[in-house]
Image (cartoon, helix red, strand yellow):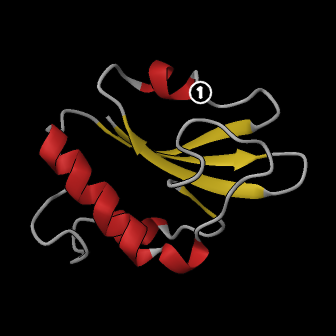
Amino acid sequence: TFYVFKLTGPLSTIYKIGGVSLGLKQALSIIPKAYTVEILHTTLDLSTAELWDIKYALKRKFSQYKVSPSIDFSGSITDCFSHFDLSVLLPESDIFNGTSVHKQ
């Protein structure tokens, strides 16, 4: 499962991207309770290679917005951003070079 979370904490709002094999419950379990979580996007049934490609493309696209949250958690150093534009996940987006986050 690929996901985009919006995390609202005591000092800031950040966006966390990621991929997990066991579903969203696994992903949500790493987020500290100090954050309110809003699930902005999920895509099921992606291969490990597809997850890697999507995360890599998004990290490059949003590298200027990379942040470290005030409360650390697993993945917070590499997968958090101060800004995230969901429109890059639309089917017509060319960011993924053929890898779609929209499975049929």
Query: Label 1, on which residue?
Result: 30
At 25% from the left edge and 75% from the top edge, which residue is drawn? Answer: 95
- In the rendered image, is residue 102 in sight? no
Q: Quadrant of residue 55?
A: bottom left
Categorize mark 1 by other alpha carbons within 10 Å: few (<14), some (14-19), many (20+).
Answer: few
Percent x, y of residue 25: 49, 19
Which amino acid is tagged 1? Ile
At 66% from the left edge and 67% from the top edge, which residue is drawn? Answer: 82
Left or right of 91 in this view: 32: right
What SS does tag 1 mark?
loop
Assign the C terminus to one quadrant of the image: top left
Left or right of 25 in this view: 93: left
Percent x, y of residue 33: 77, 26
Left or right of 63 in this view: 89: left
At 49% from the left edge and 28% from the top edge, which residue is drawn? Answer: 27
Assign the N terminus to one quadrant of the image: top left
Percent x, y of residue 36: 75, 37
In front here: 34 or 44? Answer: 34
- In the rendered image, is residue 64 in sight? yes
The image shows residue 14, relative to residue 22, as above or below, that is: below
